[in-house]
Image: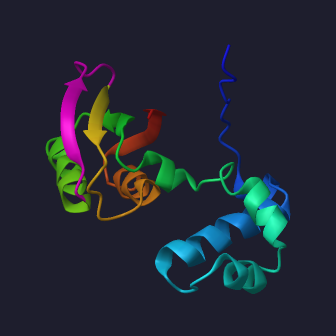
Amino acid sequence: MPNNPKYYLVQADALPEVFLKVAEAKRLLESGEVATVGDATQATGISRSAFYKYRDAITPFQNLMAGRIITFQLTLKDRTGVLSGILSIFAYCGANILTINQAIPSNGCAMLTISAETTDLACPVEELLKKTGNLDGVIKAEIVAG
């Protein structure tokens, strides 16, 4: 039976420092700021063995979400234009909306679920979520699946 890995979403400041340095070393290599693993490990202050040990075990959240379908759940005030504003933010960030489901408003609020393809996002998923959550008329915004 193959060993199926488990994944956890952990706040960055709860991680051991070595994981954050490995993630930074990977970023330096991917961005072209450094040319070799040796340069990346030297720049981040970790050993090459630590880099190779953990490189496949750590990936920033926004990178995990790239190229995937993410489901957002939002609680909206029952006001004209709120849904239009949300759709404008998704379009601005380059999210390809696949499904939209809005419940009939009750007590002045409505639940909205949007599933979107994130391959061509022009901003990180976290920024899309923050922009949406900060929109006037949005009570709550969260990612429920991805």
Please state which of residues 111 and 11 is positioned toward the viewer in this rendering: 11
Residue depicted at 32% across the width and 36% down the height: 76
The relative height of residue 109 versus residue 1 in the rendered view (above or below) is: below
Residue beneath the point at 78% across and 55% down: 53
Q: Position of residue 107 (x, y in %)?
A: 33, 22
Q: Residue at x 41, y 51 (%)?
A: 129
Residue 17 in view (yes/no) = yes
Indicate the position of residue 61 as horizontal and vertical percent values: 55, 51
Whole-percent x, y for residue 37 in the image:
67, 76
Please determine whether, in this image, residue 48 is positioned above or below residue 62: below
Can residue 109 be seen here? The reply is no
Magenta span contains residue 93:
no
x and y percentages locating residue 22 in the rendered image: 72, 65
Work out which quarter of the rendered image holds the N terminus and state it: top right
> Of 62 and 41, which appears nearest the observer?
41
Q: Considering only vertical position in the picture, is 74 above or below 54?
A: above
The region drawn magenta spans: 94-107
Quarter containing the C terminus = top left
| Number of numbered discs | 0
- Relative side of 139 to 26, left or right: left
